[in-house]
Image (cartoon, rainbow, N blue to C red):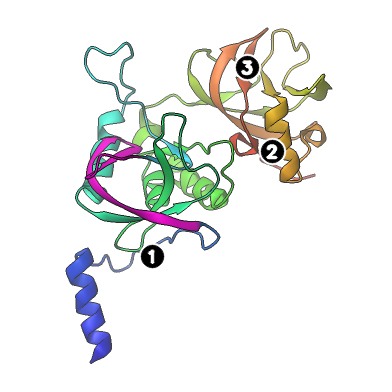
Amino acid sequence: MVKYFRFFFLLFVTGPLSFGVTATPVPLSMERCGRFVVERAVTGDTLLSTDGKTLALAAVKAPELWRPGDAYRSWPHAERSRSELAAVTDGRSLELFCDGEKRTFDNQLIAHVLLPNGHWLQHQLVEKGMVFVFPRATQALGLNALYAAELVARSGRDGLWNELDLLAEAGEQVQTGRFKIVTGEVVAAARVGNRLFLNFGENWRTDFTVEIPSHALRRFKQQGIDPLDWQTFRVEARGWVTWKGGPHILLEGPSQIRTLNIR
């Protein structure tokens, strides 16, 4: 009798269950760090609480949504991503889990979210193509699962992957002034002073380069990673592309880059 009561109680508090769909839970290694009652979704990766707090979803980025009159234009799929987030969070009490930094520079909360139905929100949004993986400097947990979910969405051209031009090859022309996910083979890896550079072409003055400054190198060392070992590796780097003697991404931490093959 007790188990039936629990079942119907679950239906009452979370709504009908989706049979045949396996919930992907938040990784057990993450730390519980509070609850958050949602007033509304502000963007595809930002929530506002009923008591005025703002939550930035950890480890993901949605297409940027700007208001009319702002200096920037919204990205394609931005409103669709916001609407999807609103549909699964508005008015709900969410359980928060933390990994790494817990607040942004402007005091927004940063956390992973467990929905009332047991689903890990970030994983669900990534798999549907509503957001893509973009960890902050100190975030490291659960990334393999998120990248696997992203691969599903990218392969099916689901959601934003059917509208946004995010992917680039290092050996081709990489557009500057845009957020890109750049893939290529590391031709040379070298330390220059307290910085490390990964070059993706023979001419470092014009070809795509990844720069790892000293504060980011310390985070690599803490995780036992030495990027100097990546020469000839095929890697994928994520971030804003600027021009610095060629297209260039500056890394804030090891979670912005990953190797795609193993020697």
**Residue 248 sits in which quadrant?**
top right
SS under mark 3: strand
- Distance of mark 3 from mark 1, alpha carbons? 40 Å
Q: Which residues are magenta?
A: 31-54
Question: Which residue corresponds to mark 2?
Answer: 219
First-in-chain label (3 vs 1): 1
Residue visible at 58% across and 36% down in the picture? 137
Image location (x, y in percent) of residue 148: 52, 49
- Marker disc for residue 248: 3
Mark 1 lies on residue: 22
Q: Secondary structure at mark 2?
A: helix
- Res 62 → quadrant: top left
Pinpoint residue 145: horizontal percent, then vertical percent: 52, 53
| N-terminal-most mark, 3 or 2 | 2
Q: Residue at x 69, y 13 (%)?
A: 207
Q: Nearer the viewer, mark 1 or mark 2?
A: 2
Q: Amino acid at mark 3?
A: His
Residue in the image at 66% along x and 41% along y? 260
For this orientation, the residue located farthest to the bottom is 1
